[in-house]
Amino acid sequence: MSDLPKRVSIAEEGPREGFQSEKKMIPVADKVRLIEALADTGLKHIACVSHVNPKRVPTMADAEQVAEAIRRKPGIEYSALWLNQQGLERALRGPLHVDGGVRVTASDTFSRKNIGKSVPDALVEQRMSLKTFKDRGMPVEWGVILGAFGCNYEGELSTDLILHRVQQALDEAELAGFKLKGIKLTDAMGWATPQSVERLIGAIRNKWPELEISLHLHDTRGTGMAAA
């Protein structure tokens, strides 16, 4: 893979990932202060909030207030995450950027734990979101494979399974009238290693050489930077 890009584009996920991982509520003003300080460092992309079920993630119950309070600087993309149709509708009512995409969870067990639905059921529900994007004229360019490198419940996941999930993302996008330009491989549980990243990216590039590939890595086991 000597033809891989020589430059890395960094998207800051700290506010969204960090705040939702805390057990105690953080004041809105403190969240906003951190986001605005990060913007002053020269970052171009900051993920700020998650529009998720507040019963599952209480520390994101104030997502709307945080989004409204941020003093946004020109040239920076401040984004909001969503996981289902209800979260998407909340995100679209707010002032932050909303990505159109197709999300497929690699592990069925993680899908049930994370969003309360099996992978097939989640894909069917997601068609509502894709219709929303279509109706609004929003682009859908990326497929996102959640937990692509391993699962705390199912362990290591086969390359064949991930290739199947990529194909499912491509199929769902095509069904809705979109053509994906790339695939984002996420590793929320921190299973990625340099070897598994190289192996999976290589397999995807061999099968779909036209697709761009993006990584969302965690340093849970101390391999995040090495994997990047």
Image (cartoon, grey):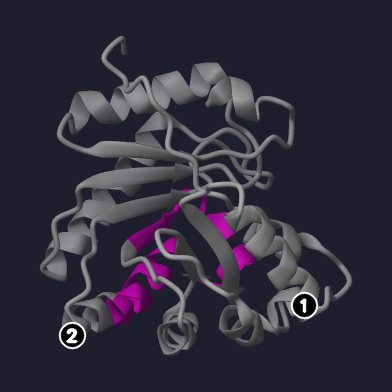
Left or right: where 183 falls relative to 112? left
The residue positioned 13% from the left and 61% from the top of the image is: 174
Q: Position of residue 118 (x, y in %)?
A: 48, 66
Task: For the N terminus, give its image quadrant.
Answer: top left
Disc 1: CA contacts within 10 A as few (<14), some (14-19) or many (>=20): few
Q: Which amino acid does label 1 sit on?
A: Ala
Specify the farthest residue to the top: 2
Name the residue beneath numbered marker 2. Answer: 135
Q: Give the range drawn in magenta.
A: 102-129
Q: Can residue 83 be seen in this view?
A: yes
Q: Position of residue 10 (x, y in %)?
A: 49, 41
Indicate the quadrant where residue 187 lies. top right
Left or right: where 211 falls relative to 189? left
Q: Counting residues from the N terminus, which is met first, the one under dot 1 or under dot 2?
A: 1
Camera-side residue: 11 or 126?
11
Residue 106 within the segment the image draws in magenta: yes
Cβ atoms at labels 1 and 2 below 8 Å apart: no
Callout 2: SS: helix
Q: Is residue 118 visible?
A: no
Q: Is the magenta stretch mostly helix, strand or loop?
A: helix
Name the residue beneath numbered marker 1. Answer: 29
The residue positioned 20% from the left and 47% from the top of the image is: 181
Callout 1: SS: helix
